[in-house]
């Protein structure tokens, strides 16, 4: 009597996994416990297939949406009320609990064969003849309970309604004009009309830039931005390629004299040199990896070798700043030589830091220290190299096996008595002796127009730093 229900409009609730289907009953299969709907709707959306087939065990609730039309069927309407048991839900019929869903097809229609509703919802055309069996206990919250299969967790409910249509790769590739694209890349146009059209459009468009190119048009970089009237014989360059020429000591003295006339006194320059050189020394000592509150028991030790002159005062100023940063500083300064007033004032300031001061090499540490800062040389009086205190201090530095930083050392005409790993030049480099020392340049605050006053065309090579490395060209 299942034929009495053909043509009825029904709403079938298959639970939260499969959802709700509406459509007209097209066939009822007693043997396989299946019901087919034509022109189906799934959750209110028209299905992309003309017919779907549902298994009785998946049906939770069945409602007739056209009751009047069903009761007034031309055949026995009295028996119709007793026939729905053949398509009842699996939870109401004990005989359907062990029934497994499987694929079916309909031969009563001339259009595309319908597909079977599987546990994961509507399948695409590849799965039209395949059935997937899953445990009823897991689906209905049995032994598996709240656990879901890996497929359900990965793909979820049926969301891709158009998976049945294969993508036309060949047709889509035919729309791609290789000639036009390659002509655009090469900057030349091919003879095809499409390529010529693309080239005409590209001529009207602005140039394209890579991700690492500057989109702002600017002037070409001039790497020789510093020119000097008297060349020192050597040229250096910065990391960015800017050329920094060396100058002889006579031009360097004229530059410092011009700076003093404009108010950049020796005291102001000395403080700047002390700050910049101490910052470089702190970096060489390890910086934040070494100088931390948790590392007080391993404070670095620095020995300052200073003479009684301006270069020695530079080193004392550097030692004062190092001592303020919790560095163990030992200052070597001979006390039997008459010192300049500026050196005396720097020593008085240094003594307020609690740093150690010695006048004999015998009082210096015998074990290697962390860093030695050499300020023994004097440009004005090279004869100091012949004195015993100078030679003994230089010998101690060469034998201590500690790295040496020389601040404003002697020029190339004078032999380097202390082998330095790093050399710090001030303002502009002078022609240093040929050694393996790494040369650095310190900004001492001389204005641009002061350089111009002594004939030096100057543009600052320092950028965002006060101490930069130089490379011999």
Image (tube, rainbow, N blue to C red):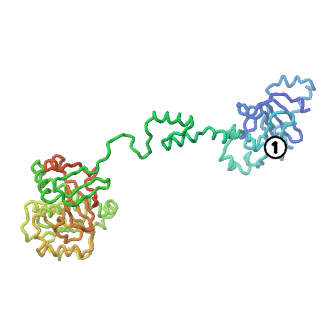
Mark 1 — residue?
103
Whether residue 408 is visible, yes or no, is: yes
- In which quarter of the view is residue 207 placed? top left
Q: Secondary structure at mark 1?
A: loop
Foreground: 4 or 216?
216
Marker count (numbered): 1
The residue lying at 64 percent from left, 39 percent from top is 174
Residue 394: horizontal and vertical position, in percent? 19, 73
Please tell me whether residue 179 is drawn above or below residue 378 in the rendered image: above
The one of 74 and 136 positioned closer to us in this rendering: 74
Residue most toward the right? 76
The picture places residue 261, in percent across and down from the top left corner, at 9, 49
- Image-based side of 132 in relation to 237, left or right: right
Extreme-front residue of the structure: 191
Residue shown at 73% from the left, 34% from the top: 48
| Residue drawn 20% across the image and 75% down it | 396
Residue placed most toward the observer, 286 or 473:
473
Q: State the image quarter where residue 2 is shown.
A: top right
Compared with 52, 225 (above or below) is below
Disc 1: CA contacts within 10 A as few (<14), some (14-19) or many (>=20): some
> In the drawing, does residue 285 fall left or right of residue 247?
right
Give coordinates of residue 378: x percent, y percent.
Answer: 13, 65
* Residue 99, quarter of the rendered image: top right
* Residue 286 image offset from top left, x and y in percent: 32, 63
Which quadrant holds the C terminus? bottom left
Q: Is residue 459 above or below residue 307?
A: above
Q: Is residue 371 visible?
A: no
Q: Is residue 287 left or right of residue 98?
A: left
For the N terminus, the quadrant is top right
């Amino acid at each position: 009597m299942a034929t009495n229900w053909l043509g009825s409009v029904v709403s079938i609730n298959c639970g939260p996994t499969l959802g709700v289907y509406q459509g007209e009953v097209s066939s009822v299969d007693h043997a396989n416990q299946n019901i087919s709907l034509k022109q189906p709707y799934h959750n209110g959306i028209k299905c992309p297939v003309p017919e779907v087939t549902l298994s009785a065990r998946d049906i939770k609730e069945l409602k007739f949406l056209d009751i009047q039309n069903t009761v007034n069927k031309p055949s026995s309407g009295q028996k119709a009320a007793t026939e729905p048991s053949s398509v009842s839900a699996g939870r109401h019929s004990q005989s359907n609990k062990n029934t497994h869903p499987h694929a079916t097809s309909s031969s009563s229609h001339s259009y595309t064969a319908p597909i079977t509703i599987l546990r994961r919802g509507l399948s695409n055309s590849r799965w039209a003849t395949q059935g997937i069996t899953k445990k009823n206990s897991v689906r209905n919250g049995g032994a598996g309970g709240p656990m879901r299969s890996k497929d359900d967790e990965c793909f979820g409910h049926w969301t891709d309604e158009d998976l049945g249509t294969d993508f036309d790769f060949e047709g889509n590739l035919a729309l791609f004009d290789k000639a036009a694209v390659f002509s655009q890349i090469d900057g030349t146009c091919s003879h095809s009309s499409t390529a010529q059209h693309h080239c005409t459009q590209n001529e009207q468009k602005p140039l394209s830039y890579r991700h690492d190119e500057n989109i702002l048009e600017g002037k070409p970089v001039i790497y020789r931005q510093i020119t000097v009237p008297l060349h020192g014989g050597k040229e250096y360059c910065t990391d960015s390629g800017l050329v920094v020429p060396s100058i002889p000591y006579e031009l360097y003295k004229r530059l410092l004299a011009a700076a003093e006339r404009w108010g950049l006194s020796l005291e102001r320059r000395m403080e700047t040199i002390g700050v910049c050189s101490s910052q470089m020394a702190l970096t060489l000592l390890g910086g934040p990896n070494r100088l931390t509150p948790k590392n007080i028991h391993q404070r670095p030790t620095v020995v300052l070798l200073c003479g009684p002159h301006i270069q020695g005062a530079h080193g004392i100023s550097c030692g004062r700043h190092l001592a303020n940063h919790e560095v163990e500083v030992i200052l070597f300064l001979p006390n039997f030589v008459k010192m300049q007033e500026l050196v005396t004032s720097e020593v008085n300031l240094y003594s307020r830091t609690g740093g150690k001061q010695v006048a004999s090499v015998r009082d210096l540490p015998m074990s290697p220290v962390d860093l030695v800062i050499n300020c023994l040389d004097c440009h004005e009086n090279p004869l100091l190299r012949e004195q015993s205190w100078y030679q003994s201090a230089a010998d101690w530095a060469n034998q201590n096996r500690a790295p040496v930083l020389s601040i404003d050392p002697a020029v190339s005409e004078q032999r380097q008595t202390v082998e330095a790993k790093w050399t710090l030049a001030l303002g502009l480099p002078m022609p240093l002796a040929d050694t393996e020392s790494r040369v650095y340049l310190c900004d001492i605050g001389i204005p641009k127009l002061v350089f111009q006053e002594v004939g030096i065309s100057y543009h600052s090579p320092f950028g965002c730093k006060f101490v930069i490395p130089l490379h011999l060209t």
